[in-house]
Image (cartoon, grey):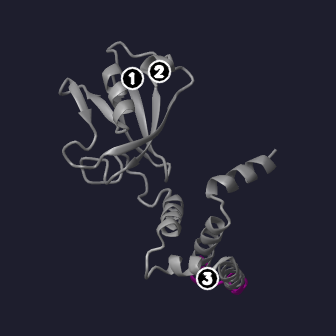
């Protein structure tokens, strides 16, 4: 992949604005700039590298803090003058020590982060993990737990107990994510299914 492959249009300074988004949570993390050299280094290293206008030099995000951004994919916008970089941050992105440079809610996209944790538990099966325990019991036990949590959620809704409803609904979503993983599906699969119905 080369800078020229994107047919990108740089601004008058020869720089391209880059919006960085977490590939798991979809949270917007930061905005920076790339020149062609930064783009090429990003592609070669698979770590987000930008051009610092204040230092007038390249900088790889995380080169001093260790909080790199591993590149998953990049997309040009419709005018070919801005790049969307989707990546996995290895720690806080902002110099303030926050998840992102934008002060959107910290729990934004958490359900996707939880899905990633469940997927990792399924792959590694660490001892002592409740999720590992569920996977070890198999699809019947996981499906039974989804049923139990669904019933408990319905009971709390009928009783009008909002605090308990929220608690049980959260249990239901967690167990449904585990069952979804056991069945070989993801939230993205559910999104595709729902989108296909929404016509």
191 to the left or right of 30? right
Specify few, some or many for label 1: CA neighbours under 10 Å numbering under 14, 14-19, or 20 or more: many
Residue 59, position as x, y percentages in the image: 24, 33
Q: Are marks 3 and 2 in contact (CB under 8 Å)?
A: no
Q: Are marks 2 and 1 in contact (CB under 8 Å)?
A: yes
Q: Earlier in the sequence, mark 2 or mark 1?
A: 1
Secondary structure beneath label 1: strand
The residue tagged 3 is 137
The residue tagged 1 is 16
Residue 16, position as x, y percentages in the image: 39, 23
Residue located 65% across and 71% down the image: 179
Span colored in magenta: 155-166
Q: Taking 163 as reference, is 124 above or below it?
A: above
Specify few, some or many for label 3: CA neighbours under 10 Å numbering under 14, 14-19, or 20 or more: few
Which circle, 3 or 2, is nearer the viewer? 3
| Separation (CA) of disc 2 from disc 1 | 6 Å
Secondary structure beneath label 3: helix
Which circle, 3 or 1, is nearer the viewer? 3
The residue tagged 2 is 81
Q: Taking 109 as reference, is 34 above or below it?
A: above
Q: Between 96 and 7, which is closer to the camera in this rendering?
A: 7
Q: Earlier in the sequence, mark 3 or mark 2?
A: 2
Residue located 63% across and 52% down the image: 188
Q: Are marks 3 and 1 in contact (CB under 8 Å)?
A: no
Q: Taking 35 as reference, is 120 above or below it?
A: below
Specify few, some or many for label 2: CA neighbours under 10 Å numbering under 14, 14-19, or 20 or more: some
Q: Between 116 and 82, which is closer to the camera in this rendering?
A: 116
Q: Taking 10 as reference, is 155 above or below it?
A: below
Residue 167 makes an appearance in the image: no
- Please identify the quarter of the rendering in which residue 12 is found: top left
């Amino acid at each position: 992949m080369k800078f020229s492959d994107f047919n990108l249009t740089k601004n008058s300074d020869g720089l391209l604005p880059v919006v960085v988004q977490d590939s798991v949570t979809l949270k917007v993390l930061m905005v920076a700039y790339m020149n062609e050299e930064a783009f090429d280094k990003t592609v070669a290293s698979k770590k987000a590298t930008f051009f610092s206008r204040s230092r007038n030099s390249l900088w790889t995000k995380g080169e001093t803090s260790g909080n790199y951004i591993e590149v998953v994919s990049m997309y040009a916008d419709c005018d070919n003058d801005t790049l969307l970089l989707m990546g996995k941050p290895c720690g806080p992105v902002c110099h303030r020590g926050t998840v992102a440079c934008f002060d959107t809610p910290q729990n934004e996209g958490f359900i996707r982060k939880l899905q990633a944790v469940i997927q990792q538990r399924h792959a590694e099966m660490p001892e002592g993990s409740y999720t590992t325990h569920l996977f070890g019991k198999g699809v019947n036990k996981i499906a039974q737990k989804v049923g139990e949590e669904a019933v408990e959620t319905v009971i709390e809704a009928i009783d009008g107990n909002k605090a308990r409803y929220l608690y049980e609904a959260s249990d239901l979503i967690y167990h449904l994510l585990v069952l979804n993983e056991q069945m070989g599906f993801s939230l993205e699969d559910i999104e595709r299914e729902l989108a296909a119905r929404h016509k």
